[in-house]
Image (spheres, rainbow, N blue to C red):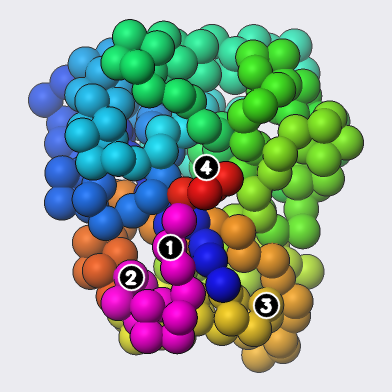
Amino acid sequence: MKVDLNCDLGESFGNYQIGNDRAVLPLITSANVACGFHAGDENVMAETVRLAKENGVSVGAHPGFPDLQGFGRRNMDMSLTEIYNMVVYQVGALKMFCDINGVALNHVKPHGALYQMAVRDEDIARTIASAVYDIDPQLYLVGLSKSLLIDAGKAQGLKVASEVFADRRYESDGQLVSRKKEGAIIEGTEEAISQVIQMVTEGTVETISGEVINIEADTICIHGDGAHALEFVQEIRSRLAEVNVDIVTLGG
């Protein structure tokens, strides 16, 4: 068995430092790089691409809503044309940094509220998939397992990667539990690792209500801004190796 291990990185900007990118990068296979709207800036984008190249880590764009104060986790009412252009703008900016550094952009993963809205809204999902395809039809589109975003990517003719989360709990319909709800975030390392192993090896996950549902795991997400991100990544690598699961980049 094999699975990709991704982390949301490049989220610092200006004088604000977020995450522990230098320590995390050598341990993952895919980096979702913030593109300056919800986090990150041009200097951090350039540096993150360079560090990813040094560590042999695949680079993906992580476009989000223009919401620095809310870290891109607040819904915004935008037209489909605005969403399309917003995705193209951000992915295009990161792609140029990749081109300059001789790095192939490998995937696109929407961030935060944009991701969650695409999971539930067919029109938004289709718009994002269309933007990604128009940029480069060889890109992977990363989305929540069994979601409308994955369906839209397939319909568009893109390669898709079903994503699961080590540090988030699930509802019975396969959606992530809202961050506004108590218990939405998994803080304990052992609980997070157990959930990952179950999702990857058994194709199931226990929901917040105790129900066990099916899930597909092509790539595992660790949130780079999480308090336990580095510890989670280290333990996931170790424990997956124990159950004979190889960690490889998307397409590897």
Between the C-alphas of marks 4 and 3, the distance is 24 Å
Judged left or right of residue 227, residue 114 is right
Q: Nearer the viewer, residue 4 or 92?
A: 4
Q: Which residue is mark 3?
A: 203
| Above or below 50: residue 221 | below
Q: Nearer the viewer, mark 4 or mark 3?
A: 3
Q: Which segment is the magenta one?
A: 236-248
Find disc 2 in the rendering and name its residue.
237
Q: Please state which amino acid type lies under the numbered disc 2.
A: Arg
Q: Position of residue 173 (x, y in %)?
A: 78, 69
Circle on res. 247: 1
> Picture coordinates of residue 149 (x, y %)?
75, 43
How crowded pointer 2 is (Cα within 10 Å; few <14, some 14-19, many 20+) is rated as some
**Label pair 2/1, CB-CB below 8 angstroms:** yes
Nearer-N-terminus badge (4/3): 4
Numbered circle sitting on residue 112 = 4
Q: Residues within 10 Å of mark 4 (few under 14, many from 20)?
A: some
The span from disc 1 to disc 4 (Cα, nearest Å) is: 24 Å
Which of discs 4 and 2 lies nearer the camera? The answer is: 2
Give the CA distance from mark 4 to mark 2: 25 Å
Disc 1 crowd, CA 10 A, few/some/many (<14, 14-19, 20+): many
> Is label 1 in a helix, a strand or a loop?
strand
